[in-house]
Image (spheres, rainbow, N blue to C red):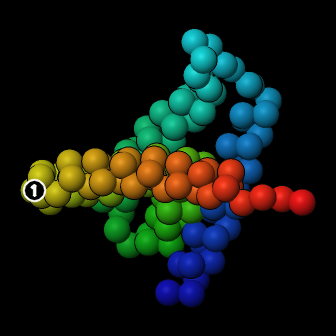
Amino acid sequence: MFLNAVAVFLGGDFGAMFRFLISETFPLNKFGMPLTIILVNFIGCFLMGLADGVFEKFAEHARHKYFLTAGLLGGFTTFSTFSLEFANLIKSGRLASGFLYVFVSVAAALIGFWLGYALSRAVKTY
């Protein structure tokens, strides 16, 4: 288990670094949206789907899977891990749970962000 955690840790470092480098090198904002990040999310989700399909065939390479999926792609974009969890629920026949997961995840993330933002505005700095 420890070596799997190290694989996730190292992959996450590289994924976050790649996301940062891409967003800093190609800052594309159109229509008031950060298109670079949307593209990063799309690429990460595409690669996560590809990796999930490949690792279904090669289950004995668990450490490689952890490095690439939870680590590299999870660090590159959390949308890829989110998509994988949703896909796992759907593939296991839990359709209602999958869509509930999507709704609750997005709602919790947005509510959490705004609560954190409101707290930061409420705290006075001197």
Mark 1 surroundings: few (<14), some (14-19) or many (≥20) residues within 10 A: few
Question: Residue 52 location, x and y as percent?
Answer: 36, 53
The answer, for residue 91, to whether it is visible in the render is: no
Question: Residue 40 location, x and y as percent?
Answer: 57, 35
Q: Quadrant of residue 61?
A: bottom left
| Quadrant in which the C terminus appears | bottom right
**Identity of the residue furthest to the right in this view:** 126
Question: Residue 51 location, x and y as percent?
Answer: 42, 51
- Residue at the location (60% across, 72% down)? 7
- Residue at the location (59% across, 51% down)? 118
- Residue at the location (79% across, 29% down)? 25
108 sits to left or right of 68? left
Q: Quadrant of residue 119?
A: bottom right
Query: In the figure, 62 relative to 110: above or below?
Result: below
Judged from the image, the secondary structure of the residue bearing numbered disc 1 is: loop
Question: Residue 111 location, x and y as percent?
Answer: 44, 51
- Residue at the location (21% across, 53% down)? 100
The answer, for residue 100, to whether it is visible in the render is: yes
In front here: 50 or 90?
Answer: 90
How many dots with numbers? 1
Q: Quadrant of residue 97?
A: bottom left
Residue at mark 1: 93
**Identity of the residue furthest to the bottom in this view:** 2
104 sits to left or right of 51? left
- The kind of residue tagged 1 is Gly
